[in-house]
Every structure is written in structure tokens, then in C-alpha cells.
Image: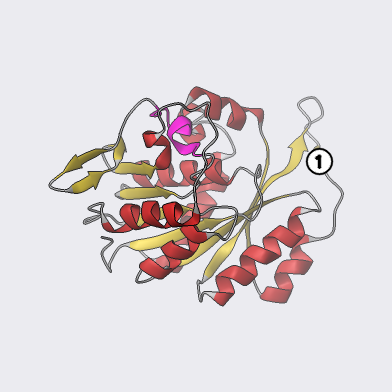
Amino acid sequence: MIEEKTSVILFLGNKGGIGKSTILANISYFFATHYNKKIGIIDMDFYNPDLPSIFGVDNRKMGIQNKKMIPVKVLSNLFLASYGFFLTDKKLPVILRGFQEKIITEQFVNDIDWNGFDYIFVDFPVSFSDGGLTLIEKLKKIDGAVIVTSSQDITLIDTERSIIFANQNSIPIIGVVENMSSLVCPICKNSIELYKRESLESLLSIYKVKILCKIPFDRNLLVSVDMGIPFIEKFKNSELIEHFKTIGDEIVKRIGG
């Protein structure tokens, strides 16, 4: 069970391919290493559970102790619960009925000893299906949501869906992270827009939601994912670290701890 004093943060993004799991992985790693907080992660992406690979722990298994499931240790103060640890053949498509999503979610919430954790970060599924809805029902409180989007025009409607979903479920929105917002030319150092689109700011002003930061495209983010080492650990001197610090500082400011 999750204690009342533990802060629960959802990472929402109603579209695949925007880097939500990558952002969550680096923020959780930042909280564990820079803020020295005990962090638990619930990976709700049952169909494409990439977090074990992003952290480089995909060859491990979750255990059982005292009739409780044990999440996989990434660091001494960072633990991950993911359906990916239960897949025997990662090449096969994951096929689940709604009731199976519900059972897995209940196990991740109720059958793991989350006592003593400062934060639980949830990689919320792209679709608002049985797994995600069960999570909302089972948690006593959700302290906030970080919405991840990208700079494509098509993501505006997906971002709006995430905002409306959070509002419908009385989940405070901490802010929006725009990933892959631009590309910095390696020669002239000018910022190049990857996509031409309507203003994200205009949409967010309607709902009174703030932009936490705009993260430019960086190939090393993709490299870190393929290596199974969080970006902030592999590329410690990168200017992008400041973006993750900005997100982390805002979460602490809004939630406390």
C-alpha cells in the first residue's frame, strides 16, 4: 500500500512517441540522486513497458517477500514496478483484457510495500483504459500531474485531453513539459523549429496551466535510452540537465518534500 504521506505524481501524455517515459526516468533519477529522496515508479504502460530497458534492468525480475511483491532496485533509493519484468519473451505482443489490466494495477498498488517512500511516480498509460482508471480509483490521493507533450501540431488535442482528464479527476496539474521543442544547429548554434504549429501557450492559457520547460531535441537522449543509462547520469555536463532540475524544483515547490 501507498502511505498517505507519500506524494504521488502522474506523468500524463495522451500520445505515444513523445518521450514521456524518458522524461519520467530522468526526473525520478534526479530526485533519487540530487534530492536524495526514496522514489518508487509504477509503470502503467503494460503493452510497451520500456522503463526496465531505459534503466538497464530489463534482465531482472520482481520478487516476493512476506507475501508482498518486491519492485526491482535501480538504485538504493529508486525502485521500479513494471509488467515488463514478467514478460518471458519481449518480442511477442502483449495482449490483455480489461480485467487483466485491473488485476495488475491492483497488485502494483496494494501488493507492493511502498512504506517509507517519499514519492511515487506513475507512468500513466496513453489510453484512459481499465488500468489507468483502476489506479485512479485505488489511490487515496494523487498530488499532481506532469503532462508531457511534443512540438507537433497534432499533439495539441492530445495535450488538451490530458488536461481535461486531470481536471475531471480533481488532479492538480503541476505543468506541461514540451519535449523535442526545437533543434539546436551544431554548426551555427541557432534554434530551429522542428514543426510549425499553433501556440501551445494559447491552449494552456485557456486552462490556466503553465509550461514548466521546453526541452530541445538532443540525440544523446536517444543514446542514453538505448544504453540503459539515464541521460542525467551519462551526460552529466549537458545543458539539458537544467531542464530536468527546473521540472524537479517545480514539483518540490508545488508538492513539498
Q: Quadrant of the N terminus?
A: bottom left
Height in image: 216 above or below 246? above
Q: Secondary structure at mark 1?
A: loop
Residue 143, horizontal then vertical, whole percent: 42, 68
Direction from residue 225 to residue 118 in the image, left or right: left
Q: Quadrant of the C terminus?
A: bottom left
Residue 238, horizontal then vertical, whole percent: 57, 33
Q: Identify the residue at horizontal 68%, vertical 74% (top origin).
A: 207
Q: Residue beneath label 1, please?
A: 194
Q: Identify the residue at horizontal 44%, vertical 67% (top origin).
A: 136
Amino acid type at circle 1 is Leu
Direction from residue 115 to residue 17 in the image, left or right: right
Count residues near mark 1 (Cα–Cα under 10 Å), then give few for <14, some for 14-19, many for 20+: some
Q: Which residue is more in the foreground, 25 or 81?
A: 81
Extent of the magenta region: 49-58
Residue 231, horizontal then vertical, whole percent: 51, 33
